[in-house]
Image (spheres, helix red, strand yellow):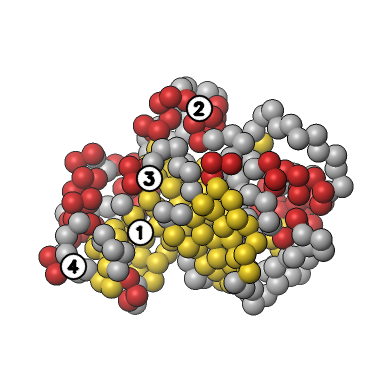
Amino acid sequence: MKLVTYQIERFPVSLGVLNRDETFIYPLRSLEIDYHTMQELIVKASEGEMQRIAYGASQEPEAICGAAPLSDVKLLAPIPHPNQDVICLGINYMAHAEESARFKNEAFNGERPYAVYFSKRANEAVSPGDPIPSHSDIVDSLDYEAELAVIIGKEARNVSEEQVKHYLFGYTIINDISARNIQNRHKQWYFGKSLDGFLPMGPCIVTTDALPYPPKLSIRSKVNGELRQDSNTSMLIFGIDHVVSELSRGIALKAGTIISMGTPAGVGMGFDPPKFLKPGDRIDCIVEGIGTLSNHVV
């Protein structure tokens, strides 16, 4: 099922679930699920409550009090205010590793023996349809990165690869906006990946039971309608099982932790000459089974 955080006009922010054909949103409170934020739902919802939501999503709109057409609501980032920074995977598709090395004029031997981890500041996620600030006073090479993100569903410590799927809540899409000049100048990625407005997220969270595991999903991005990235999450160098298991050996992964799994080839810096973003550009990040996350640069 697809869970959303949404708002109708000036009414309070609500949690909802999409119906079967994804034309209506059903408020969770109408299903007697009374959590105020997605983070609270992830941490506290019981298996019975999740089953109740799934059953409610299967009903017709006229049976659900407060059902609203999807076209009438404003979708927000599913987790508007993450409790901690997002854990990210760097160069986790081989073709992207190659284009990254070319951009930096570095040799690449085709080997990637260990995962590259970094964190992305997450003061506030950008909602679908909302603007991405260009920060043109300090950024001259604004870039996009379509990524599948995994959300931890319960605290994970020393989890084996075989057990990882039982610790996951769901998936969403993240556009890992990056300032390449800042990223390369400082020789690390935190600042260049973490400027305000650099965390578009959405449009929903798809629960893990809704997709085959491990997910082998088409992942694409478009800029102003031009296809830029076109790959599949089956091409990840380090998959979800490896990443969650490895991190959990030394870090307690709390419920609600967001792990962004890296981006495929086709980002702006990978072209010759580079195709960086500019104000007015629209970016669509599309992941099969989840949806499309669209934003524009200002």
Based on the displayed image, in which of its 4 quarters is residue 271 positioned?
bottom right
Does the rendering let one see residue 154?
yes
The disc placed on residue 211 is 3
Residue 120, compared with residue 66, is above or below; it is above
| Residue picked out by circle 4 | 61
Q: Of discs 4 and 3, which sits in the foreground?
A: 3
Alpha carbons under labels 1 and 3: distance apart: 17 Å
> Any mark on residue 4, and which?
1
Q: Nearer the viewer, residue 23 or 4?
A: 23
Crowding around mark 3 (Cα neighbors within 10 Å: few <14, some 14 to 19, many 20+) is: some
Q: Residue at x 40, y 67 (%)?
A: 75
The mark nearer the N terminus, 4 or 1, is 1
Q: CA distance from mark 3 to mark 2?
A: 20 Å
In the visual, does 56 lie left or right of 245?
A: left
Secondary structure state at the residue bearing disc 2: helix
Q: Which mark is residue 245?
A: 2
Could you tell which of marks 2 and 1 lies nearer the N-terminus? 1
Q: Position of residue 186 (x, y in %)?
A: 79, 48
SS assignment at label 1: strand
